[in-house]
Amino acid sequence: MTGFYFYARAAEIIAAYGGDPARWPDDERANALAAVSINPELRTAQSAAAELDADVMAWSQTPVAPGNAIAAATAAMRVPRTYLRWASGTGLAAAIAASLIVLAPVHRTGPVAPVAVAARIVVSDESTAFTQVFTPTPDEEQVL
Amino acid sequence: MLHIVETPATLIVRVAAGDVRAFTTLVGQLHGSGLRIATRVAGDRAEAEDALQGALTRLWTEAGRFDPAKGSVGGWFRRIVVNQCLDRRRRLKLVAPIEAAANVASDFPDPFASASANARARRVDAAMAMLGPRQRAAITLFHGEGASMAEVAAALDTTPKAVEGLLARARSELSRLLASDRPETRDE
């Protein structure tokens, strides 16, 4: 690898990977180091990148207050696995399709008595009722 | 007494079979790094905890989908955490009315936290908050977690070449932000 491409690729590597040659791609490290040793601009770029690396490392290693792993695990297991599988996109789509098949031939002509669940919900309008009866998960939103 | 340390690879098999104790042990091993990554990517502790909780729920329900041929449990979980963070961010953008923007808390660190940090760290923190979440994720994984370019690409559902570009743009933007920032006036 020689010429402009040689330097340009070394500059790209420094820009993306930073100033530490240990993090550079294994198969390109030797060429990039050779380019840096020859080209003063690349040396300047490498030392600037190393300064930024130090800032980024300091930022990324600032301690994060620990959370409660046990509580998180317990909360994660609160929803039964079978329910979640059913409530996933495929399961919900199948449920909707099945309900359409079952309900499609039914034509109600007479008055319909309100069901017990609906009677317990106090709502101001239809959209509020919908949110109280059914709050979709992100997967369900995609299906809907 | 011989104490056997269970690896994530053995635990995930038992989690897939519904073993509650294995799941609790696995969460104990992954929770710290998951919270660290989520906090960096989300830029907000509460948001990070919600994203991590979503990731743990997926770990519990989707453990059977883990394929050891495609990488480690840690890498797989990292990918779930990052995706949860990015998904939540996307949803927030979609549902927030424009009027609400005036009331949204700043992404910058709160004054009390900033006061206790040194000036350079404060400026880096503020500059990081200005980056996009995918850029923060790439920097967090590559520099913070020491992940390889291929691992970052897997976590972000993209190619190593695309991550190279993402990291280069993130680092360039960060340099620009830090250079344009005025030096702080020091009292000492």
Image (cartoon, coloured by chain):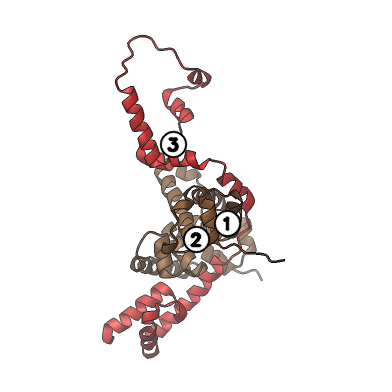
Chain colours: A red, B brown
Disc 3 secondary structure class: loop
What's the residue type where badge 1 is placed? Leu
Disc 1 secondary structure class: helix
Q: How many marks?
A: 3
Q: Single out the residue that lies furthest toward the bottom.
A: A38
Judge if badges 2 and 3 mark residues of a common chain. Answer: no
Residue A80, visible in the rendered structure:
yes
Judge if badges 1 and 2 mark residues of a common chain. Answer: yes
Residue B108, visible in the rendered structure:
no
Disc 2 secondary structure class: helix
In the figure, A38 relative to A54: above or below? below
Look at mark 1 in the image and give the residue it sits on: B26
Q: Single out the residue that lies furthest toward the top.
A: A110
Look at mark 3 in the image and give the residue it sits on: A136
Disc 2 and disc 3: Cα gap in Å? 29 Å
Residue contact at pointers 1 and 2, CB within 8 angstroms: yes
Q: Earlier in the sequence, mark 1 or mark 2?
A: 1
**Dot 1, crowdedness within 10 Å: few (<14), some or many (≥20)?**
many
